[in-house]
Amino acid sequence: TVKNGLETFEGRAFEQCRQLTTAYIPNSIKSVHSVLIPFKECNLLEFLTIENGFNANNLNLSNSTKYSAETIVSWLEALADRTGQDTYTLTIGATNLAKLTDTEKAIATEKGWTLA
């Protein structure tokens, strides 16, 4: 669990936590270093919850491909609405993107987010 109140993902966060299967990201995170992959080499990560109202650019969750479509959709639903503001990017990777329908992807894009 990322401590609620933490505002920035810096450094390598959970890099190489190879046995990590479950994680929680609070909406207190306001910034993510643009080249940081907080869960790099956490290939077993399957259950990841993003708190409702999440509003930080450049979160990269592409390292694991074990997420279900339902889990990914829950992230998209949790994203803050950025309509009329700068577009933010959530990176989930090609394999995870392929699990989503166009309608599911639109949950994020209609809120002003880009999926990568």
Image (cartoon, rainbow, N blue to C red):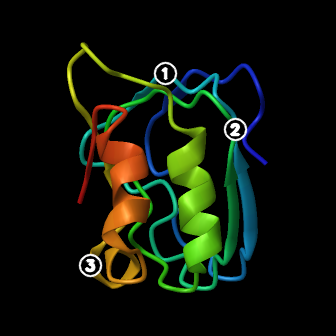
Circle on res. 94: 3
| N-term-proximal mark, 1 vs 2 | 1
Residue 116 appears left or right of 99:
left
In the displayed structure, 11 sits above or below 65; it is above
| Residue 105 quadrant | bottom left
Residue type beneath disc 1: Lys
Residue indicated by mark 1: 30
Residue indicated by mark 2: 51
| Residue 69 quadrant | bottom right
Q: Position of residue 89 (x, y in %)?
A: 27, 42
- For label 1, count other residues whose C-alpha is less than 10 Å away and answer few (under 14), some (14-19) or many (20+): some
Residue 55 appears left or right of 26:
left
| Residue 99 in sight here | yes
**87 vs 24, nearest the viewer:** 87
| Residue 59 in sight here | no
Residue type beneath disc 3: Ala
| Residue 95 quadrant | bottom left
Q: Residue at x 60, y 80 (%)?
A: 68
Residue type beneath disc 2: Glu
Q: Position of residue 100 (x, y in %)?
A: 41, 75
In the displayed structure, 86 sits above or below 100; it is above
Q: Residue at x 52, y 63 (%)?
A: 39
| N-term-proximal mark, 2 vs 3 | 2
For numbered disc 1, what is the local secondary structure?
Answer: loop
| N-term-proximal mark, 1 vs 3 | 1
Q: Position of residue 18 (x, y in %)?
A: 62, 81
Between the residue at mark 1 and the residue at mark 3, the CA separation in whole angstroms equals: 25 Å
Q: Position of residue 98 (x, y in %)?
A: 33, 83
